[in-house]
Image (cartoon, rainbow, N blue to C red):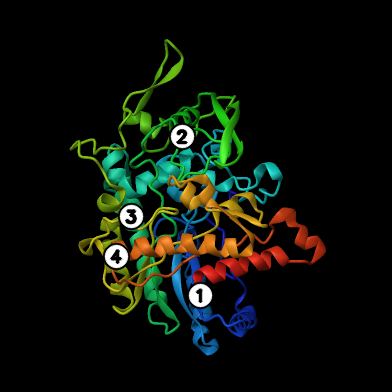
């Protein structure tokens, strides 16, 4: 049972058994679809431990994708993640990555370090609707993203043993493992005619890198709903200190507002294992980002700008240029070396951010396509669609509210078209003539309180799909 089956879990037969593939592929082709974004996860390939690969799963994926040309289909393979891992409330990395950093998997929920109801089969109650993305800013996922991209810079004291028994930075261990896993994936699938290319990382997140405040969030990228500890509150909770945390509810025109407070982790449990690399201490307390004042019995923030500047050089950091772009180049070299130079490398920016202007030619990789995502955030957040739609993309960037409101089906088409146009426009301004493909989009099929499931009348799903496809075209 979750999470105790972390090493033995298998993804063979997912998304469907091999014998069912002809039915699914034929249906897609009959619907006029020809291009698939096929998802794999790091956990599916390397769940049993570092360097231990699930060859049965890789064989299954190869057999499955080998069938694509027979149905007139091609795919690009995306290494998928949300909120870092299933074990921190999403999907992606194996459980051992969190344990490597010192997290106690069994204490993640109680300490507010992760929201796990969704991966445990919940998330269907009204109070839990749409809560899972808040996991990005909770302690587990935010810490792991920081360690993966920038652990050498912001957590230099955190050392782990590599396969040779040598102490290395946790960033090096995590990235070396990811590169080796990706290389094996590319070697397994890279010669297939039906595989057009590979995507390095679905919807990356900065973690704490460039964190502007330990006490608030970025409305463009960070959802806060239900009980959401700030970064500083997360540190205290994880270290075993009961802490009052704000509770956020849906509102308008801003997505949420704080309506109450609740004390989390009332029993004072620590999320950090004594046998972990920090010796049971919060990683960020170990690096003097914060501390606990025993006399006043409260947490004290010591380095307000810690994640804005390189602690060694004092230079302001940029997540893209300092961390993402260099790793993209390393990853591309490994994947290309194991597959073929003509395979396309699909990339994307942080969700809900436009393509950064810093993505200059020296930071690009050969044969690159930009594959950002788009959703109508208002419909996704409310799980509702009707005669009134809102341009959340514009509102979050200072658009005058009345200009962000649209009425009727033609208004929905206009709204969605403008948002997708903005994404593509900024991409071409930053990247020039590199191909742009909307790598992910969709609609909530359970919209409007799931009424279509009872009435069998999917008129609103149809209308929203029409507006989205019109915008894409």
Q: Which is in the foreground here, disc 4 or disc 2? A: 4
Q: Residue furthest bottom?
A: 70
**How far across and down, in percent of the image, does residue 142 sit?**
43, 43
Q: Which residue is mark 1?
A: 36
Estimate the spatial distance between the alpha carbons at disc 1 and disc 2, rounded to whole Å. Answer: 40 Å
Give the camera-side residue of 97 and 342: 342
Estimate the spatial distance between the alpha carbons at disc 4 and disc 1, rounded to whole Å. Answer: 24 Å
Estimate the spatial distance between the alpha carbons at disc 3 and disc 1, rounded to whole Å. Answer: 27 Å
Of the two numbered discs 2 and 3 on the same chain, state the one appearing first in sequence: 3
In the figure, residue 180 lies in which quadrant? bottom left
Of the two numbered discs 3 and 4 on the same chain, state the one appearing first in sequence: 3
Q: Residue at x 38, y 77 (%)?
A: 190
Of the two numbered discs 4 and 1 on the same chain, state the one appearing first in sequence: 1
**Residue contact between numbered discs 4 and 1, judged by CB atoms under 8 Å:** no
**How far across and down, in percent of the image, does residue 387 sit?**
67, 57
Badge 2 density bin: few <14, some 14–19, many ≥20, Cα 10 Å = many
Q: Regarding mark 3 in the picture, which secondary structure is present there?
A: helix
**Residue contact between numbered discs 3 and 4, judged by CB atoms under 8 Å:** no
Q: Residue furthest top?
A: 295
Q: Regarding mark 1 in the picture, which secondary structure is present there?
A: strand
**How far across and down, in percent of the image, does residue 45 sit?**
47, 64
Q: Which is in the foreground here, disc 3 or disc 1? A: 1
Q: Which residue is mark 4?
A: 431
In the figure, residue 447 lies in which quadrant? bottom right
Of the two numbered discs 3 and 1 on the same chain, state the one appearing first in sequence: 1
Q: Residue at x 26, y 48 (%)?
A: 166
Q: Regarding mark 4 in the picture, which secondary structure is present there?
A: helix
Q: Which residue is mark 2?
A: 272
Q: Which mark is residue 175?
A: 3
In the rendered image, the vertical position of residue 246 relative to residue 391, given as above or below: above
Q: Regarding mark 2 in the picture, which secondary structure is present there?
A: loop
**How far across and down, in percent of the image, does residue 169 sit?**
29, 45
């Amino acid at each position: 049972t979750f999470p105790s089956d972390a090493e033995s879990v298998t993804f063979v037969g997912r998304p469907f058994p091999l014998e069912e593939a002809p039915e699914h592929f034929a249906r897609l082709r009959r619907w006029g679809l020809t291009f698939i974004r096929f998802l794999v996860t790091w956990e599916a390939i390397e769940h049993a431990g570092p360097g231990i690969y699930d060859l049965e799963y890789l064989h299954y994926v190869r057999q499955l994708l080998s069938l694509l040309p027979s149905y007139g289909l091609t795919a690009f393979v995306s290494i998928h993640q949300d909120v870092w891992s299933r074990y921190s409330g999403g999907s992606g990395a194996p459980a051992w990555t969190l344990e490597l950093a010192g997290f106690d998997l069994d204490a993640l929920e109680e300490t507010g370090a992760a929201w796990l109801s969704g991966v445990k089969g919940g998330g269907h109650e009204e109070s839990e609707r749409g809560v899972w993305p808040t996991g990005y800013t909770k302690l587990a996922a935010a810490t792991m993203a920081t360690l993966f991209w920038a652990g050498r810079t912001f957590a230099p004291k955190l050392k782990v043993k590599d396969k040779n028994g040598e102490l290395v930075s946790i960033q090096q261990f995590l990235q070396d493992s990811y590169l080796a896993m990706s290389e094996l994936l590319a070697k397994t699938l890279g010669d297939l005619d039906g595989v057009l290319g590979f995507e390095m990382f679905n919807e990356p997140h900065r973690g704490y890198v460039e964190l502007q405040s330990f006490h608030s969030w970025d409305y463009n990228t960070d959802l806060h709903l239900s009980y959401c500890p700030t970064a500083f509150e997360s540190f205290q909770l994880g270290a075993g200190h009961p802490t009052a945390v704000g509770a956020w509810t849906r509102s308008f025109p801003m997505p949420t507002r704080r309506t109450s407070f609740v004390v989390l982790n009332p029993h004072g449990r620590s999320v950090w294992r004594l046998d972990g690399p920090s010796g049971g201490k919060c990683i960020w307390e170990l690096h003097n980002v914060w501390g606990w004042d025993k006399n006043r019995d409260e947490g004290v923030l010591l380095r307000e700008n810690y994640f804005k500047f390189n602690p060694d050089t004092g230079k302001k950091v940029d997540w893209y240029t300092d961390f993402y772009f260099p790793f993209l180049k390393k990853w591309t070299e490994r994947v290309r070396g194991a597959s073929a130079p003509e395979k396309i490398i699909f990339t994307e920016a942080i969700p809900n951010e436009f393509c950064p202007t810093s993505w200059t030619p020296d930071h690009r990789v050969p044969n690159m396509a930009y594959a950002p995502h788009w959703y109508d955030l208002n419909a996704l957040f409310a799980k509702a669609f009707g005669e009134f739609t809102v341009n959340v993309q514009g509102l979050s960037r200072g658009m005058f509210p009345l200009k962000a409101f649209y009425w009727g089906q033609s208004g929905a088409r206009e709204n969605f078209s403008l948002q997708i146009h903005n994404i593509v426009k900024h991409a071409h301004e930053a990247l020039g003539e590199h191909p742009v493909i909307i790598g992910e989009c969709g609609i909530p099929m359970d919209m409007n309180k799931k009424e279509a499931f009872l009435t069998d009348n999917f008129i609103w799903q149809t209308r929203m799909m029409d507006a989205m496809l019109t915008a894409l075209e």
